[in-house]
Image (cartoon, rainbow, N blue to C red):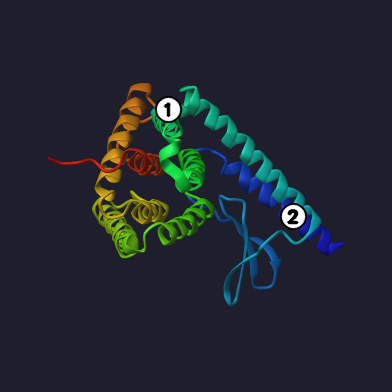
Amino acid sequence: MPAERVAMGQAREIIRLKCLTDHPRRLDKIHRPASTAPGRHLSVTVGGIIQESGAIGPRQMAFPQTPMQRLSFLTIRRRRCRRLVEFAKSIFLAGGEGRPHAHVAWVAIVGFGYLVSQSAQLGGFILPTIALFGALCVIAVFDARYFIIPDGPILFLTALGLITVCLSDWMEAPDRFAAAGVAYFVLVLVAWGYEKWRGAPGLGMGDAKLFALAGLWLGSRGLPSCLAFAVLSALASAAISLRDGSLTNLRQPLPFGPHLALGLWLVWVLGPLETS
């Protein structure tokens, strides 16, 4: 009986914390320890992953252990999926909280339609292109809603990008790998400098990972165009938010992941911008 009461208490704590963190302007992670055993605690991350920490350091649990935890975990996942679908609809229809990101969705859809019309020229790249579009959509919606870029789509596109590079042209591999590394460290440096200057974080590590992914897919020639498209899109979102009143001060965070995803997609579709 004591073990069952502990498990029920853990499940209630997980649900309560998840309800608190469902607001779109929440912090990246909220940790609230729930006692489970001497020296051990549970903490809930935004993605619904349960982490157990003890004397030897944090250890991620692959899946909740008790039936009550499994039920709570699945309930949280279903609730999050429904909210993401509703938020994606608001983006597509340019209404509510999704209005500042509507142009991102529609420009990406137009680009996808253009590629479909040119599908005969894609050849073997048609399936990687479809997978790229789908994964970038997940990244953009998730970051726009939760200010978090999930690792799953990033890892999937990294593996797919490596396969694409290996099967297409080995001569480009060094450039792609170097571009990915430079892109990552550039955004990490920008994030560090901004935090030192303003005293608050401006970019997350997810943005750096996504920009590194752009380097892997686009190479060094495509990175400047990707960043240019992303900045222009972010400025458009900021202008729409200011007009709608959802952005009230310059210190209010704005997700950059959707715009980086759009920049990657546009360069993949149209190629890098050419300078005369």
Near-viewer residue (77 or 26): 77
Which comes sooner in the sequence, label 1 or label 2?
2
| Residue at (54, 54) in percent of width and height | 152
Q: Residue furthest bottom?
A: 56
Please identify the residue farthest to the left as the structure is shown. Answer: 276
- Residue at label 1? 106
Depth check: give the residue in front, 226 or 149.
226
Q: Measured along the vertical axis of the image, is residue 74 above or below residue 85? A: below
Q: Which mark is residue 273?
A: none
**Label 2, on which residue?**
69
Q: Classify the position of the C terminus by image quarter.
A: top left
Q: Where in the figure is residue 28, as x and y percent of width and height?
A: 48, 50
The amino acid pointed to by label 2 is: Gln
Of the 4 image quadrants, the one containing the N terminus is bottom right
Q: Quick check: 211 left or right of 134?
A: left
User: Residue drawn 48% across and 55% down?
Assistant: 160
Label 1: state its secondary structure: helix
Residue shown at 30%/57% (left/top)?
183
Secondary structure beneath dot 2 equals helix
Q: Given this view, does label 1 or label 2 mark the residue nearer the observer?
A: 1
Q: Are marks 1 and 2 in contact (CB under 8 Å)?
A: no
Amino acid carrying label 1: it is Trp
In front of the other: 24 or 6: 24
> Where in the figure is residue 154, as x and y percent of width and height?
48, 54
Is residue 54 placed above or below 24 in the rendered structure? below
Q: Nearer the viewer, residue 262 or 37?
A: 262
Q: Residue 196's spot in the image, x, y percent?
A: 26, 56
